[in-house]
Amino acid sequence: MSLRSVRQTGDEILRKKSKEVKDLTPRLKDLIVDMKETMKNLGGCGLAAVQVGVLKNIIVCAPNEEEEPIVLINPEILEKSETMVEDSEGCLSVEGYRGKVLRPKSIVVKAKDEKMNDIEFDAEDFLARIICHEVDHLNGVLYTDKVVEGTLEEIKDDDAGEKE
Ligand SMILES: [Zn+2]
């Protein structure tokens, strides 16, 4: 288990598309363990593999600090609610900033779990927001691309907010 360094905006890897995971190799299992640790260590609530420099469709989401993070492999958003919600977001790859982004209130997600079993579920509110943010990372998109105009702001250390 080890902490990995998180790529920062400007690093071109963050703009690349991640690839499907066909086989969950021991190396990728180690990556998932490290992703969870790295996210926790930095106080984040979500992390995509590309953020630690690996172009694989893997994300971890932690809507709740006390619970074990949710691991999604090859996640796909099948449906998005018409109702959109505007809320504040940050990103471990865009340190020191946050801004408001419109996201669907609820989504239907298809993915594989940590054992490569197929799963499908509904996610709402904060979890839906995290998954949308992380799936964007897998497509080379950062929240700053879609931030509501005029809402991107610098934040102070003691007011870090949620970081994905
Ligand atoms: Zn992010």
Image (cartoon, rainbow, N blue to C red):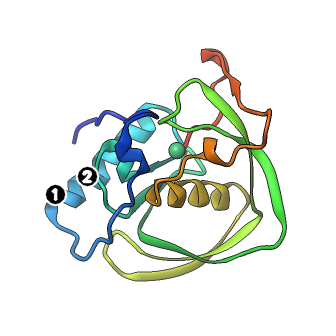
Between the C-alphas of marks 1 and 2, the distance is 6 Å
Q: Is residue 22 above or below residue 33?
A: below
Q: Which residue is mark 2?
A: 31
Residue 110 visible in this rendered orientation of the protein: yes
Circle 1/circle 2 CB separation < 8 Å: yes
Q: Nearer the viewer, residue 140 or 89?
A: 140
Say whether residue 39 is left or right of residue 150: left
Q: Is residue 38 above or below residue 126?
A: above
Q: Quadrant of residue 55?
A: bottom left
**The furthest residue to the right:** 83
Q: How packed is label 2: few (under 14 Cα within 10 Å), some, or many (20 or more)?
A: many
Q: Amino acid at mark 1?
A: Arg
Q: Amino acid at mark 2?
A: Leu
Which x, y percent locates residue 45? 54, 44
Label drawn at residue 27: 1
User: Is the residue indicated by label 2 positioned so its CB lies within 8 Å of ligand 1?
Assistant: no
Say whether residue 121 is left or right of residue 36: right
Q: Nearer the viewer, residue 16 or 41?
A: 16
Q: How packed is label 1: few (under 14 Cα within 10 Å), some, or many (20 or more)?
A: few
Say whether residue 13 is left or right of residue 72: left
Say whether residue 23 is left or right of residue 136: left
Label drawn at residue 128: none
Residue 69 visible in this rendered orientation of the protein: no
- Which structural element holds mark 1? helix
At 29% from the left and 50% from the top, the residue drawn is 33
Which x, y percent locates residue 119? 47, 81
Which x, y percent locates residue 100? 75, 41
The N terminus, quarter of image: top left
**The furthest residue to the left:** 26
Which x, y percent locates residue 156? 65, 16
